[in-house]
Image: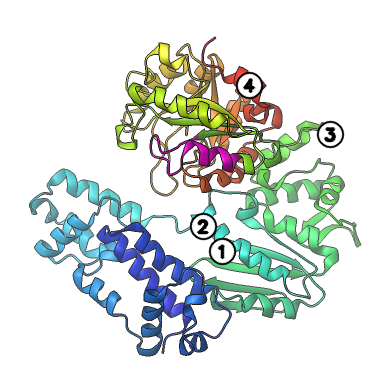
Amino acid sequence: MLDKLDIARALREVAMLLQIKGENPYRARAYETGAEALEELTDDLGELIQHKRLTELRGIGAALAGQIAELYKTGRSEQLEKLRAELPPGVLELSQVPGMSLKRIKALHDALGVGSVEELKRACLTGKVRAVKGFGAKTEASLLEGIYRYETRDERVLLVDALELAEPLLAHVRGCEAAEQADLAGAIRRWEETVADVDVVAATDDAAQVVDWFARYPRVAEVEAREDARCAVRFSGGLRGELLCVPPRYYAAALHHRTGAPAYLSALGALARELGLTLDERGLLRGSKRLSAKTEEDLYRHLGLPYIAPELREGAEDIVAAAARDGRDDALIEEGDIQGMVHCHTVYSDGKNTVEEMALEAEAMGMKYLTITDHSPAAHYAGGVGLDRLKQQWDEIARVQERVRVKLLRGTESDILESGKLDYPDAILEQFDVIIASIHSRMKMDADQMTRRLVSAMRQPVFKIWGHALGRLIQRREPFACHVEEVLDAVAGSRAAVEVNGDPYRLDMEPRWIKEARKRGIRFVISTDAHSTNALHNLRFGVGTARRGGLRRGEVLNALGPAAFKKAVRPAA
């Protein structure tokens, strides 16, 4: 008899196999939703099945309930077995290799019996793949590169996925009567793009009770280690987690210590030693005297430093930068500072919602303006808006504006063409309220060619915002090659700004380049690159990335009010 986590794993396998087959994505997502519902289940699964109450769970309909009951009672799933029989052996593993489509997996299985990554690797190294019809030496070399990327892949998960688990987990820990305080720490608190584990720190005088409560979280698949005040677990899906419990008087120090990156903590520890102090998760100690630190601000005060936000606790350079502030009030941008949503798509290109639906959602979020920036004609794959439909869109924006309070701005995400010119004639570009200029094609140009392309684009006479600057998709596509400093120099000397893209699969540009841009006095917008009303709520990811780059409110254009923002980004001089 399978337990709820075993059944959840089976449902996730069905979802992945359906995706590989190219089935309706909503069908695959239904199995994912069912798996999540089981992982979070606190009631007795057997009783729910016996009393036919599975459909009371979020996202579980009658058909899925039947499959769950089948798995629970028999340990088998007819649907899963059918999918396994239809697809080649090893398809789940092989599909993780970049460049391996289902068509290629089938062809190599039929011709060479390939059923694993190791077998694929041997076939490539012995030159057998190139002999298969439809492949060749170039494809074989490309697959070897994909295998290398697979074997050296980062097993960290995206921040957005980690938060889906971490935030309910934190609520669970805070729900324990013995926990006085609890917070997420580690890479999540620093808003890193990817996360290896979920760290939680709790303040309590009864660590055993909190540890037991933590270990009983429904999505815990295995308790890997357990001590009086610590508990390490593995969650369903593979992500690891750890809880640290400390007495309330040590909470600030422990939270601080579990938040900073190793290089940062090492540098801060060295500074403490220069002052005759030791610094660890129990606070600051001078000789035999422990200094009082009720808050993280107290810790920094004892070290002679201004408060350093969690997002900036990465390395020694962050400590140097904090010391250079010399007490100046120079607060980082916050989500509440943002007054307008920038870079938003609608059904006019590849968005899921209408102009009015996007406007109403932005209004409900308290925003004062919204830019409608659908793709330009060159992005034909995304339904780019041709000149014949542009007036239609502008007319609709005007009609919707009469029904909503949020200010609607006419914009475009204009493709940067190979030449560096922007898509749409100049006479049209000048009629927009805002232009996002982005690269979506020919991303494999060499660094010199791409740099010339971008520099030319930034020097175009209209004001433009450089969108998702380096085109990366985290863990899926590397940033394209270019000499970033040269492009930033061009931005600084042109009518341009830079976007911090809040799409959690992009988070572009990276914090290191934000810092370089700031040195040049470049201005920014923080966007969501929203293709739906739900995606508007990704703003916090953009703000988190901006804070990691050290952005202040005065450097962010969409922290301005509607009139000031429109004036600042107006394409025509």
Q: Earlier in the sequence, mark 3 or mark 4?
A: 3
The span shown in magenta is 344-362
Q: Please, what secondary structure does the residue beneath circle 1 have? A: helix
Query: Mark 3 highlights which residue?
Result: 327
User: What residue is at 9 percent from the left and 54 percent from the top?
Assistant: 132
Front tag of 3 and 4: 4
Task: Answer whether labels 3 and 1 touch (C-beta < 8 Å).
Answer: no
Residue 431 is labelled as none
Q: Which mark is residue 161?
A: 2
- Label 1 near label 2: C-beta < 8 Å? yes
Which three-letter amino acid code belongs to the residue tagged 2?
Asp
- Whichever of callouts 3 and 1 sits on the residue coming sooner in the sequence is 1
In space, the residues marked 1 and 4 are separated at their CA atoms by 38 Å
What's the CA distance linking mark 3 and mark 2?
37 Å
| Kind of element beneath mark 3 | loop
Residue, disc 1: 165
Whether the residues at callouts 3 and 2 have beta carbons within 8 Å, the answer is no
**Residue 338 horizontal/vertical position (percent):** 66, 35
